[in-house]
Image (cartoon, grey):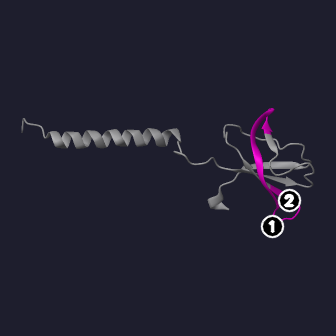
Amino acid sequence: MERHASYALVGIISTALLVAAIVFVVWLGGSRLGGSDDPYRIIFHGPVRGLSVGAEVQFNGIKVGQIERIRLDEEDPNRVVTDLDRPDQRGNACKAPAAQGKPEAAPHHPEQA
């Protein structure tokens, strides 16, 4: 057994383990490193009078985002689709302001659309 350690090899392995640990902690924390949050999509069945682009979206009376886009569903023109910009993703549900109709909220992932 050799008594002298290879300091270069120990340094390389230590550095690699430190980098791997940092990458794991960032991945575990869900950090996007400057990426934007996922937009949400709300689908309304029926009329949506009072809904407009840029309108505030509230959850329990607190602003959690705003409406970015409103359009008719391509598959069913009786459904109105709204895309929301939500900088705070901690809420489980949103309430669109003064819109009539029953919304169904679902996270929207552009790569799946």
Query: Residue 56 versus residue 21: which sits nearer the camera?
Result: 56
Q: Residue tagged by mark 1?
A: 75
Image quarter hosting the N terminus: top left
Q: Is residue 1 visible?
A: no
Q: Is the magenta stretch mostly helix, strand or loop?
A: strand
Verify CB contact (< 8 Å) between mark 2 and mark 1: yes
The disc label shown at residue 56, or none:
none
Specify whether residue 70 is painted magenta: yes
Q: Position of residue 82 (x, y in %)?
A: 79, 54
Identify whether 47 is placed above or below 8. below
Quadrant of residue 75 within the rendered picture: bottom right
**Which residue range is magenta in the image?**
58-81
SS label for mark 2: strand
Residue at the spot 17% in from the left edge and 42% down from the top edge: 8
Residue at the spot 92% in from the left edge and 54% down from the top edge: 47
Q: Residue tagged by mark 2?
A: 79
How far apart are the two marked residues, 2 and 1, measured between alpha carbons? Answer: 9 Å
View extreme (top): residue: 61
Identify whether 51 is placed above or below 14. below
Residue at the spot 80% in from the left edge and 67% down from the top edge: 74
